[in-house]
């Protein structure tokens, strides 16, 4: 058994060095789906980052009646946090804090300041700023506040004003996900077909040899083994090429992408996700190499 | 050793290639199968190697019906039969040495034995100086000698040669037939499919003559008569 494994490995290494042209072609073709899978992974990270950045700026504010007591408002906050795990955070803003925030924000604008002076009293209502995990959850929270047990305490919920923006964002984010998924799927399928066809051409060259091996009584694994190991070698080299190429690309693209998505460094993302990226690349490279060797040789083993 | 019992092979729709063929070949015989092109010689060999199944009848190798053998048994059977083809069927990405060693590696022989016996067979076939060459660097005669070396290196019970001299000049034809003869002299069976009248007549061994898929003559010390 050990001797057979040793021989299969030796045949694979010999064949690999003797079929350099075909193997170089196979390696470069394998690079395509690996880079594609890596790009999809990074794109998903980027789009996720953009979405969460936009999402973090989106909230729903529940304004309470002027006479609502602070403890009642805090009770509503605690109740909401208790009943819904979808809520990320709730911030209580008192009347005074709202006025303070407004003044701080517009102290350089005399029109605003004059208007505030003319009103004479604090026109702001106490409120709860609610942030959910997903934007589609705002509607549910809003209707809970408007028609739930605390509705008599609530003056208004500004969801209806933000509804259009939130819905638009939900649609865009869902479209991005769908488009990415479909485009990725199609490109990936094409890449796999290209890989299988290229490796098929390479194995086709050995068709007569496979038949000859069969005729001298070689077992399926004795024939298939060297092709599969060559697939592993090609896949591993393709993985190394892709890892270096994608790391270099991430390093140079990082400053440019940061303009588009502030706070997102593609290089940091690459380094932080190196384990997963390496796993994806090696999985695709070696997996495809082995799969191609396994499937394509099989068709010639029927002798 | 090898028995064909009422073997018929029909290709769709109704092309009869072998028609109720029966004969027996014993261990140590040198049998030539002769006939015009399309007489059924190659089909007969393909059936013997389990590359095709007969439409009806039985083919027995050492009393085992080839038709009922499992895939793994078929592998073992092929290891017991050395085969030589007109188009050589060599392993083009392996050297001359590796082509011969491969057959022994398939059998699971030890490295030392492989080294020793491959060297001997290279000497016997006059290919020692070409050991590190690839098949595409050999002449037709050398390729066929390599095919013979590969077929006999394991000392199989039987060697089947399908038109082994079809592409060779008279000198190389003589060389190849001599090698087959020397193998036969060690007590092994040789089955030679050929339409080379001169060789068959010179051999003076048993001749099975096929015509339109039927055995029309089976003579000990026979001659090529068609």
Image: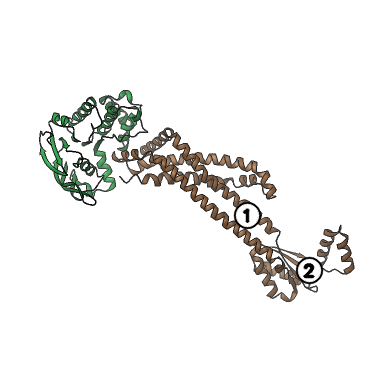
Give the Cα distance between marks 1 and 2.
33 Å
Chain under numbered label 1: A
Residue ID at (45%, 34%): A20
Asked if A6 appears above or below A276 in the picture, the reply is: above
Asked if A146 appears above or below A47 in the picture, the reply is: below
**Residue B94 rendering spot, x and y as whole percentages:** 36, 32
Number of the label disc, if any, that sits on residue A116:
none
Chain coloured brown in the rendered structure? A
- Of badges 1 and 2, the one in the foreground is 1
Mark 1 Cα-neighbour bin, 10 Å: few <14, some 14–19, many ≥20: some
**Residue A100 rendering spot, x and y as whole percentages:** 83, 62
Residues at badges 1 and 2 in contact (C-beta under 8 Å)? no
Task: Indicate the colour of chain B.
Answer: green
Q: Is residue B217 left or right of residue B94?
A: left
Query: According to the image, label 1 marks what residue?
Result: A48
Residue ID at (54%, 47%): A36
**Residue B166 rendering spot, x and y as whole percentages:** 23, 32
Query: According to the image, label 2 marks what residue?
Result: A126
Q: Is residue A255 left or right of residue B216?
A: right
Q: Residue furthest top?
A: B129
């Amino acid at each position: 058994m050990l001797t057979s494994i040793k021989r299969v490995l030796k045949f694979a290494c010999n064949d690999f060095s003797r079929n350099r042209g075909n193997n170089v072609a196979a390696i470069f073709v394998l690079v395509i789906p690996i880079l594609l899978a890596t790009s999809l992974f990074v794109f998903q990270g980027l789009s996720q980052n953009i979405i969460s950045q936009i999402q973090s700026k989106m909230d729903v504010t529940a304004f309470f009646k002027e006479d609502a007591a602070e403890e009642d408002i805090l009770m509503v906050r605690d109740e909401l946090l208790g009943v819904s795990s979808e809520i990320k955070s709730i911030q209580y803003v008192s009347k005074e804090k709202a006025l303070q925030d407004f003044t701080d924000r517009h102290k350089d604008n005399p029109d605003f300041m004059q208007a505030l002076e003319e009103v004479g009293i604090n026109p702001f209502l106490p409120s709860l700023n609610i942030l959910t995990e997903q934007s589609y959850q705002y509607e549910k929270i809003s209707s809970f506040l408007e028609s739930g047990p605390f509705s008599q305490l609530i003056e208004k919920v500004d969801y209806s004003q933000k509804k259009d923006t939130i819905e638009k964002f939900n649609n865009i984010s869902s479209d991005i996900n769908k488009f990415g998924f479909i485009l990725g799927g199609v490109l990936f399928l094409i890449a796999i077909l290209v890989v299988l066809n290229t490796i098929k051409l390479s194995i086709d060259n050995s068709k007569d040899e496979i038949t000859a091996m069969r005729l001298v009584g070689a077992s399926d694994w004795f024939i298939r083994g060297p092709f599969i190991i060559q697939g592993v070698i090609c896949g591993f080299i393709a993985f190394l090429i892709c890892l270096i190429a994608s790391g270099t690309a991430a390093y140079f693209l990082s400053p440019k992408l940061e303009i588009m998505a502030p706070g997102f460094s593609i290089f940091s993302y690459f380094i932080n996700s190196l384990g997963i990226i390496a796993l994806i690349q090696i999985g695709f490279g070696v997996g495809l190499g082995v799969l191609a060797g396994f499937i394509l040789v099989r068709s010639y083993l029927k002798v | 050793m090898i028995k064909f019992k009422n073997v018929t092979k029909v290709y769709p729709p109704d092309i009869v290639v072998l028609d109720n063929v029966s004969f027996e070949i014993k261990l140590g015989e040198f049998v030539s199968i002769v006939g015009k092109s399309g007489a059924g010689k190659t089909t007969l060999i393909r059936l013997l190697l389990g590359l095709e199944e007969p439409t009806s009848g039985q083919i027995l190798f050492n009393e085992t019906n080839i038709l009922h053998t499992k895939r793994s048994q078929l592998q073992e059977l092929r290891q017991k039969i050395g085969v030589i083809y007109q188009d050589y069927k060599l392993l083009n990405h392996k050297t001359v040495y590796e082509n011969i060693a491969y057959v022994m590696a398939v059998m699971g022989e030890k490295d030392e034995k492989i080294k020793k016996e491959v060297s001997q067979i290279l000497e016997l076939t006059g290919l020692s100086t070409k050991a590190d060459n690839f098949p595409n660097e050999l002449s037709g005669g050398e390729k066929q000698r390599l095919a013979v070396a590969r077929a006999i290196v394991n000392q199989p019970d039987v060697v089947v040669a399908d038109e082994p001299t079809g592409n060779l000049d008279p000198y190389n034809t003589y060389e190849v037939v001599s090698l087959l003869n020397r193998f036969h002299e060690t007590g092994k069976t040789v089955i030679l499919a050929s339409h080379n009248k001169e060789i068959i007549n010179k051999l003076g061994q048993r001749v099975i003559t096929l015509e339109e898929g039927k055995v029309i003559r089976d003579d000990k010390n026979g001659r090529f008569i068609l």
